[in-house]
Image (cartoon, grey):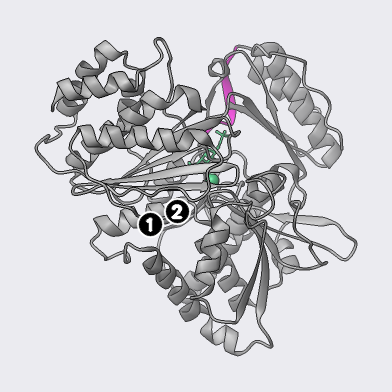
């Protein structure tokens, strides 16, 4: 390794002394102004990982659902999965090394991971810059580097930050190639395809559309031929990249599925009052979408790795079908097929603490499907799901399947609805969600909260869990937990109970407990306005 060059370039991306960051649930996220050095160093790390695995590695520069002044970066492993845990630790150490420690930390990583520095590194960089969001995607593999120049520039930080990544890649001898504008899941797909030499699919966006649309057509052709008229779906694309990609996919889909795209980025701001996260957290329809009663609608999030469905009934009531309902639909479908085929494969559903209690109860007691609870974050669910012949995993927020892919999940849901000849209200009627509420609390240092039992119980600060238990005991069918966010500087609170009013009150009381026992800052949390 040419340490002299690394150190010289590193000075151009100098670390703010004393700044400490953590590779969180899905990479680093913080104010863009504090990320330059991290980007450069993740460029270095991606090359090392590529050399070690002799494979393509993805690096994505993204601000995801965080506010506009934030940005972030995550690495994608050879099979399109999230970065291995040991390398997350290397990432944190590398990002936090002061300039004079850089050489030692790099040498240490190479030694621990037996990186062959003489090996090649192939890197592909793409950027996604849409209204209100910029995401840059970098692939590292053992041969080259691909770079994509953004179309719309609205977050000034991303261009510079992606340049910092490529500086890091080049200083260790990587090369560039442009992979174009892609969604996060498409990036994961490409990484997997490249490293499995076409066995998984062709590593192009066309290959992705062909793979998904062929599977959809194959799966549904019989059901579609028996239908009167086409199926139709309204999609809120959160003003993100999903709109563009869904339009492209449309060319590969037969006329039997009509997709109407709303919030396509031409008018609104990314994720602003729309998108899967907004719909799930606020439990109301997005702005910019005119729903007719009974009309089947869904929302993607900004980078198209989450999806939730919903509709309004004749009385105008809004009904949300979140990740739990999606997991239930998919696992019920698969379970029925397994029973029909007389198969004895191991089968389980993986959820997180956010899963609605009714969904867990329905899966376990009615469907007789084993359910496991994992920590928040796709990587945790993914690894648990891999323990079974068939594992279905979804977070309640609509993040599921391989790494979360709103487009492929949408097609799967549409296919199942067609095959089972189900309407959304019928699907919704599988079980009734317990009313729930999510809140966030600002504290001085969210690391004060440590959790156990897949984040369902707080171990620290002392007294907090006891207080939560006491509050929960005052309500019926109640459950609540708190956890430090892995992507935002807040503590998240989840509560569910027999009525919406009780869920709101429970969430508020637990928020106050967090505020008082875990170093809340600012005004105490206010009661939820129903
Ligand atoms: C990230 C995770 C998502 C998780 C969310 C939780 C990935 C690819 N993404 O977006 O799975 O639900 O963080 O955020 O793992 P929080 O820790 O801020 O609640
Ligand atoms: Mg997302």
Say if 358 sits above or below 465 in the image. Answer: below
Pick the residue in front: 515 or 288: 288
Distance from Cα at disc 2 to Cα at disc 1 = 6 Å
Residue 123 located left or right of residue 381: left
Q: Residue at x 30, y 32 (%)?
A: 87
Asked whether 248 or 275 is in front, the reply is: 248
Q: Which residue is mark 2?
A: 185
Q: Do residues under tags 2 and 1 come within 8 Å of each other at their CB atoms?
A: yes
In the picture as drawn, the residue positioned furthest to the right comes out as 315
Q: Position of residue 46 (x, y in %)?
A: 28, 37
In the image, 465 versus 522, the foreground residue is: 522
Neighbours of disc 2 within 10 Å: few (<14), some (14-19), many (20+): many
Q: Which residue is mark 1?
A: 189
The x, y position of residue 101, in whole percent, is 25, 13
Q: Quadrant of the C terminus?
A: top right
Q: Is residue 487 visible?
A: no
Between 3 and 418, the one nearer to me in the picture: 3
| Residue numbers of the magenta segment | 454-461
Residue at left 15%, top 26%?
111
User: Residue 48: x and y, percent?
Assistant: 22, 35
- Disc 2 secondary structure class: helix
In-image side of 43 versus 270 (left or right): left
Q: What residue appears at the point 43 percent right and 24 percent down from the top-left corner?
A: 22
384 in magenta: no
For the N terminus, the image quarter is: top left
**Element under disc 1:** helix
């Amino acid at each position: 390794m040419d340490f002299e060059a690394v150190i010289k370039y590193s000075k151009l991306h100098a670390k703010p002394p004393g700044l400490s960051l953590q590779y969180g649930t899905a990479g680093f996220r913080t104010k863009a102004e504090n990320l330059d050095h991290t980007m450069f160093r993740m460029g270095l790390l991606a090359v090392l990982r590529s050399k070690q695995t002799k494979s393509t590695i993805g690096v994505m520069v993204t601000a995801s659902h965080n506010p506009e002044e934030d940005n972030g970066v995550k690495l994608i492993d050879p099979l399109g999965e999230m970065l291995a845990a040991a390398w997350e630790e290397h990432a944190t150490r590398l990002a936090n090394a002061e300039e004079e420690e850089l050489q030692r930390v790099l040498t240490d990583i190479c030694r621990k991971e037996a990186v062959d520095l003489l090996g090649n590194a192939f890197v592909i960089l793409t950027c996604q810059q849409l209204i209100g969001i910029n995401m840059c995607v970098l692939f590292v593999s053992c041969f080259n580097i691909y770079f994509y120049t953004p179309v719309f520039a609205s977050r000034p930080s991303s261009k510079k930050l992606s340049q910092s990544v490529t500086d890091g890649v080049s200083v260790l001898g990587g090369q560039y190639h442009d992979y174009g504008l892609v969604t996060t899941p498409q990036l994961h797909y490409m990484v997997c395809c490249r490293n499995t030499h076409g066995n998984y699919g062709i590593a192009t966006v066309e290959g992705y559309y062909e793979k998904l649309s062929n599977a959809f057509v194959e799966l549904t052709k019989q059901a579609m031929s028996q239908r009167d008229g086409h199926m139709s779906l309204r999609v809120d694309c959160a003003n993100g990249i999903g709109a563009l990609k869904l339009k492209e996919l449309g060319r590969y889909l037969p006329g039997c599925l009509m997709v109407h795209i709303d919030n396509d980025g031409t008018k609104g701001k990314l994720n602003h009052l729309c998108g899967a996260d907004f719909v799930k957290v606020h439990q109301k329809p997005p702005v910019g979408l005119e729903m007719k009663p009974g009309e089947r609608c869904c929302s993607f999030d900004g980078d198209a790795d989450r999806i939730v469905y919903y509709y309004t009934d004749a009385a105008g009531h809004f009904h949300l079908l979140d990740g739990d309902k999606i997991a239930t639909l998919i696992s019920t479908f698969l379970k029925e097929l397994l029973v029909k085929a007389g198969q004895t494969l191991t089968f389980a559903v993986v959820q997180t603490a956010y899963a609605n209690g009714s969904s867990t109860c329905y899966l376990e007691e009615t469907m007789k499907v084993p359910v496991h609870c994992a920590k928040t974050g796709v990587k945790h669910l993914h690894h648990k799901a891999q323990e079974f012949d068939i594992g279905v995993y979804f977070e309640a927020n609509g993040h599921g399947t391989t790494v979360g892919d709103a487009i492929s999940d949408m097609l799967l849901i549409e296919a199942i609805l067609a095959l089972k000849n189900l309407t959304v209200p019928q699907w919704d009627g599988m079980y009734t969600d317990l009313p729930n509420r999510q809140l966030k609390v600002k504290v001085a240092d969210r690391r004060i909260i440590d959790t156990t039992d897949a984040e369902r119980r707080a171990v620290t600060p002392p007294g907090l869990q006891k207080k939560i238990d006491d509050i929960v005991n005052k309500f019926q069918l109640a459950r609540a937990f708190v956890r430090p966010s892995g992507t935002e500087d807040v503590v998240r609170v989840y509560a569910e109970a027999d009525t919406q009013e009780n869920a709101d009150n429970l969430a508020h009381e637990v928020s106050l407990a967090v505020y008082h026992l875990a170093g809340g800052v600012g005004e105490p949390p206010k009661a939820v306005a129903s």
